[in-house]
Image (spheres, helix red, strand yellow):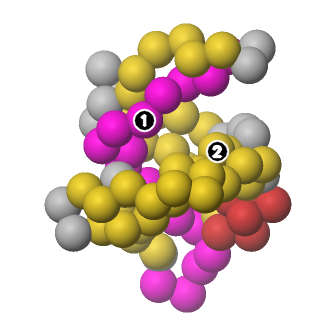
Amino acid sequence: DSALEPTVGSPNISILIDQGFLIKNGEISHPLKETMIGTNIFELLKNIDAISKEVVNESGYISPTIRIAKTMVAGGK
């Protein structure tokens, strides 16, 4: 699950990935925890390359799993 925080008057967003996975060469490389990605909403939408049919309900957020082809990743464990 993630939290979107738009910058007022800007399409730039930073997203906190509470639970996710880094995928390299089509394989799950390692889990991501407390990791930030930064992009703008237009690039984020353009780089979505897969969405699951199933939905996940975690902490009140109900959403499908979404794969983003490329984005900036910062920090994390």
Which disc number belongs to residue 53? none
| Residue drawn at point x = 72 percent, y = 39 percent | 70
**In the visual, does 20 lie left or right of 18?**
right
Disc 2 packing (10 Å; few <14; some 14–19; many ≥20): some
**In the visual, does 26 lie left or right of 7?**
right
Q: Which residue is mark 1?
A: 20
Is residue 75 among what the camera can see? no
| Percent coordinates x, y for residue 27 in the rendering | 66, 14
The amino acid type found where label 2 is placed reads Arg
Disc 1 packing (10 Å; few <14; some 14–19; many ≥20): some
Res. 34 image quadrant: top left
Residue extending farthest bottom = 9
Against 39, residue 68 (above or below) is above
Residue extending farthest left = 59
Q: Earlier in the sequence, mark 2 or mark 1?
A: 1
The amino acid type found where label 1 is placed reads Gly
Q: Quadrant of the C terminus?
A: top left
Magenta segment includes 77: no
Q: Which residues are magenta?
A: 8-24
Cα distance between the residues tagged 2 and 1? 10 Å
Is residue 37 among what the camera can see? yes
| Residue drawn at point x = 47 percent, y = 84 percent | 8
| Percent coordinates x, y for residue 20 in the rendering | 42, 35
Characterize the magenta stretch by its predominant secondary structure: strand
Which disc number belongs to residue 67? 2
| Percent coordinates x, y for residue 30 in the rendering | 46, 14
Which residue occupies the foreground of this view, 1 or 11? Answer: 1
Against 4, residue 32 (above or below) is above
